[in-house]
Image (tube, rainbow, N blue to C red):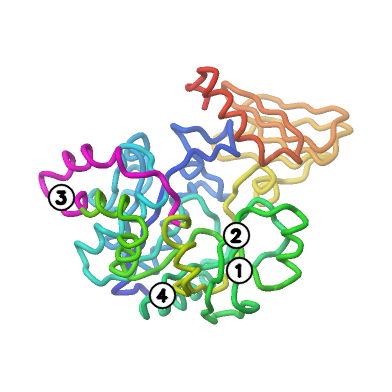
Amino acid sequence: MTSTELHVVVPAGGSGTRLWPVSRAANPKFLHPLTGTERSLLQATFDRLAPLCTAERMLVVTGTAHAAAVARQLPDLPDRNILVEPLARDSCAAIALAAAVIDKRSPGAVMASFAADHLIADPAAFGEVVAHAVAGARDGALMTIGITPTRPETGYGYLRCTEPPRPSAIQKVLEFKEKPSADVAAEYLKSGRYLWNASMFLWRTEVFLAELATRRPDVYEPIRLIAQAWDTDRQHDVLAELWPDVPKVAVEYAVMEPAAGEGRVGTVPGDFGWSDIGDFETLGELLGRDQDGARVVSLPGRGGPVLAVDSEGVIVVPADRLVATLGVTDLIVVDTADAVLVCRRDRAQDIKRLTELLRKRGHQGLV
């Protein structure tokens, strides 16, 4: 059932550098059909949130380069609900702008923020967890939905909780932890007191904005002035003037981590088949099919033939031509029209280093 008070924000930014060369700055992963269907990750997010929030109460925050694509993929979303950032300023600025606009349009609203590039296998279970988190937000807590860990994952941040999380139960978050080493991640899993941080947040808009004003006035003040001008004929001029000077900082660092240290952050554990599809390992696991020792990921509109001979543990993402492997093990092979990636599977998390190097060498068009 659609909540009459819940407003949902979908930050749609980043370039998915660990999925390069499929994901690019001009065509990032949230615009790709990485869902096992023809729907993009962004469209799947919209579909998942539709039962919780009407399109009139859903906002997408995205960059100038992606605004037109977002509008095309989400024709039911009102144009005024696509908030366009002139420059990327990290998650705090994007979420704060949405919170301030919502607070102006609907004072006292409960707001949720869910990324555009996540995949969830059980939307019904997701909706139930959101309902519990909304209750905590309504009572004034800064809420986050933590993901029940299934393995000692080193690619995610963690939430340290007051006690072993229980389904549907709200409890305090003591600390946000950075991505751990394998040994530390194993200790987290064994303790039973940690959840993955999926950057899913819920709060009353005025509560979050008050926290931001106290903790990061350098972010809050320009956002406040921009929001005052929003939905007026001054919107674009004020945004262009003030936005470039908004500090770049993640919302976890700016608000959630210090608030957790003061007992202001609550969490509800989620176990609904969540994935951020952060690298080709995950993509192969979720969408690949086994073929002669290879795990082949054929995306809609792509998918040439794959020939794997005497190959083991190979992930292949073909484009439109034949990809053949012979006598190799534990590799990732990704083919696109203008770039080919070959790397060891245990280096999947490091693919973003290639995009950094390409930028440094002036190959912006390939990033």
Mark-to-mark CA distance, 1 and 4 = 17 Å
Q: Which residue position is annotated with label 1?
A: 160
Q: Which residue position is annotated with label 2?
A: 177
Nearer to me, 319 or 178? 178
Expressed as whole percent of the image width and height from the top left, the position of residue 22 reads: 57, 34
Could you tell which of marks 1 and 2 lies nearer the N-terminus?
A: 1
Q: Residue at x 60, y 35 (%)?
A: 352
Expressed as whole percent of the image width and height from the top left, the position of residue 49 reads: 41, 63
Nearer to me, 119 or 100? 100
Q: Are marks 3 and 1 in contact (CB under 8 Å)?
A: no
In the image, which is nearer the foreground, mark 3 or mark 2?
Answer: 2
Mark-to-mark CA distance, 3 and 2 = 37 Å
Could you tell which of marks 4 and 3 lies nearer the N-terminus?
A: 4
Mark-to-mark CA distance, 4 and 3 = 28 Å
Position of 235 with respect to 301 (left or right) is left
Q: Which residue position is annotated with label 3?
A: 229
Disc number placed over residue 141 in the picture, else none: 4
Under circle 3, the secondary element is helix
Mark-to-mark CA distance, 2 and 4 = 20 Å
Considering every residue shown, the one lying at the far left of the view is 233
